Amino acid sequence: MSGALIELHDVSRIYDLGHVQVAALQGVDLEVEEGEFLAIVGPSGSGKSTMMNILGCLDRPTGGTYSLAGTPIAELDDDGLARLRSRTIGFVFQSYNLLPRTSALENVATPLLYQGVSRKDRLARAQVALERLGLGDRISHIPTELSGGQQQRVAIARALVTEPALLLADEPTGNLDSASGAEVMTLLTQLNAAGRTIVMITHDAEVASRARRQVHVRDGRLVA
Ligand SMILES: Nc1ncnc2c1ncn2[C@@H]1O[C@H](COP(=O)(O)OP(=O)(O)OP(=O)(O)O)[C@@H](O)[C@H]1O
Ligand SMILES: [Mg+2]
């Protein structure tokens, strides 16, 4: 296994609509080392979501190769890919994607269910993750009883509770007012300073400037 956590070589994703083929990604080469904080930046329609889906193992390239944590994903069947995903990646979405009518503690504990952790240990680890994000006094609150910024911090705690090698964030401040958005960016910066690898996808140049490295996507290609 080489050093890079993420290795894309000549990756393409062609959507085949029968009468027409849409090249959403073409010729993408990208390496992300452990410990990096990378922003993938581009305008609407440039291929960011397609890239996010491929990096997150929710979709496969139609050409080229993707290795995640030393594993070429082409060698895995769908179950193997799902296992690699849940072991390696914590996801943060623009719209938080928390379970409604479910406490912050239960939300954060959920990913551990799929790893066969006992209920007692799940709740203990979720509690620690929430305390680390400054939400120790909000563990019993359900999403509608939390502010947007707090909901996103719960979502970040949920992404981190499995101690993933990679935090993959898709427009993590997209639904937040500027103060809460700034708080979330400060949090991501601190997590990266503590060693967490972060890949963030955004159309917002100011948000992207908080990352330590940026790559730009235009019409499905990475440009300098
Ligand atoms: N399922 C699909 N079938 C066909 N074409 C698609 C599909 N999904 C995306 N595309 C096309 O691929 C290109 C890239 O789309 P993508 O959703 O990755 O862009 P994006 O950068 O995420 O845009 P936005 O900022 O608006 O979310 C676009 O031209 C889009 O129309
Ligand atoms: Mg998108």
Image (tube, rainbow, N blue to C red):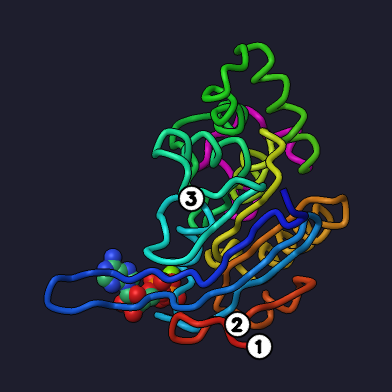
What is the x, y in percent for residue 163?
72, 37
Q: Which mark is residue 216?
A: 2
Residue at label 3?
57
Question: What amino acid type should be assigned to the residue bearing mark 1?
Answer: Ala
Q: Quadrant of residue 14?
A: bottom left
Question: What amino acid type should be assigned to the residue bearing mark 2?
Answer: His
- 175 lies above or below 68: below
At x 61%, y 35%, the residue is 87
What is the x, y in percent for residue 138?
68, 34
What is the x, y in percent for residue 99?
46, 36
Q: Quadrant of residue 60?
A: bottom left
Label 2 close to label 1 by CB (< 8 Å): yes
In this image, 160 relative to 151: left or right? right
- 88 lies above or below 207: above
At x 41%, y 66%, the residue is 63
* Dot placed on the residue nearer the N-terminal end, 3 or 1: 3
**Judging from the image, what secondary structure is the residue with disc 1 in?**
loop
Dot 1, how many residues are within 10 Å of its Cα: few (below 14), some (14-19), or many (20+)?
A: few
**Judging from the image, what secondary structure is the residue with disc 3 in?**
loop
C-alpha distance separating marks 2 and 1: 6 Å
Count the labels in the image: 3
- The magenta span reads 134-150
At x 74%, y 34%, the residue is 129
At x 80%, y 39%, the residue is 132
Q: Nearer the viewer, residue 215 or 206?
A: 215
What is the x, y in percent for residue 44?
43, 81
Residue at label 1?
224
Q: Residue furthest left?
A: 19
- 30 lies above or below 122: below
